[in-house]
Amino acid sequence: MLTLEAPWALLVLPLPWLLRLLMPPAPTRGALALPIAAELTALAGQAKGGAAWLQPRLLLPVLAWVLLVAAAAQPQWVGEPVTLPASGRDLMLAVDISGSMDEADMEVAGRRVQRLAAVQAVAGDFIQRREGDRIGLILFGRQAYVLSPLSLDRPTVAQMLSEAETGLAGKETAIGDAIALGVKRLRHSKSDDRVLVLLTDGVNTAGSIEPDKAADLAATADVRVHTIGFGSDGRGGFFQIRRAQLDEAQLTRIAQQTGGRYFRARDTQDLARIYAALDEIEPVEVDARTFRPRTAVFYWPLAAASMLALLAWVLRGGLPTTTKQVAA
């Protein structure tokens, strides 16, 4: 629908007629005269007055003035209500890219792929579903580093995850350092819900902080940690598959100590179900607030007023119809 941002501007609409009624007649020379004073006088002098409005020399300036005032009122087109998705949740993903994540014991779309490729496919979809959440990404091997800080730009975070490669952070696994880094990024968050989802296919073999100590830091900072143990159990048929070496007891302790949950994923389908479960455990909180998009349309009456004013000027003799020959 159409609304006016400054409806008070319509109060100036009768200004030319009020000036004509209240101000003394202007002298014929040396003063500013109302451009349509003659037409208004003719209008006032007619008993039935309505016919004067049909005269183009009067009608065009009047319409131009009305449109100019309408433009000054700042008309806006208000669209349909749009719900604002919002969440009070900040969520960091910590993904293991140690050397063991290149084990090709997973299947995606009928193709056997590395563990990291399966995580990129499933976790990428998970990131895209978290509309309204601030998502961050930590990659860890021997060292842990933040690839993406907390951001609402989900496509970029998903793209960064898809470009990760095994071994970039070293061949070993620093679970404690990854948790501590996630806590460091989340502890100063203003969100009431601070969540770290850690995925690994190995045991802690590197780093300066023990996983249990990092879990203490997370609990103190009110950061909830969900842990995912990922990798096959060694049954691969004709394929030689290395069994995932997991300290499930430790991953369970970390999750329980921080109020989170531990999940075990043996294949891509398990992993997809786990991330779907995380969507339910940590739902996107949609705010009931809505807004109606507004589009300014003042330029339409402004353009129409300019065209009518130009046309009125032409009809009043604004353009010369003859040219004078000047003798040399």
Image (cartoon, rainbow, N blue to C red):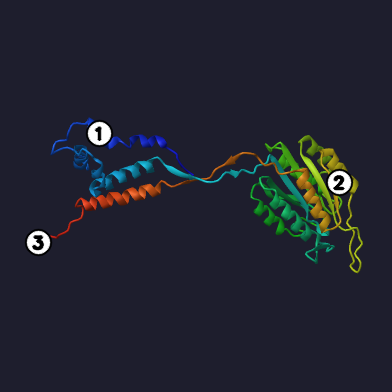
Neighbours of disc 2 within 10 Å: few (<14), some (14-19), many (20+):
many
Residue 204 visible at all: no
Residues under numbered marks 1 and 3 in contact, where contact means CB atoms less than 8 Å apart: no
Residue 92, placed above or below residue 8? below
> Amino acid type of disc 2?
Leu
Residue in the picture at 91% in, 66% down:
237
- Circle nearer the viewer, 2 or 3: 3
Q: Earlier in the sequence, mark 1 or mark 3?
A: 1
Q: Amino acid at mark 3?
A: Val
Q: Earlier in the sequence, mark 2 or mark 3?
A: 2
| Left or right of 117, for residue 309 | left
Q: Tell me residue 197's x, y (percent).
A: 77, 47
**Which is more toward the observer, 313 or 104?**
313
Q: Which of the labelled discs sits on residue 19, or is there none?
A: 1
Residue occupied by mark 2: 251
> Tag 2, which secondary structure?
helix
Q: Which corner quadrant holds the C terminus?
A: bottom left
Residue 284 visible in this rendered orientation of the protein: yes
Residue located at (20% from left, 50% from top): 316
Of 239 and 182, the residue lying toward us: 239
- Work out whether residue 220 or residue 284 is closer to the camera in this orientation and state it: 284
Give the label on residue 326, or none: 3
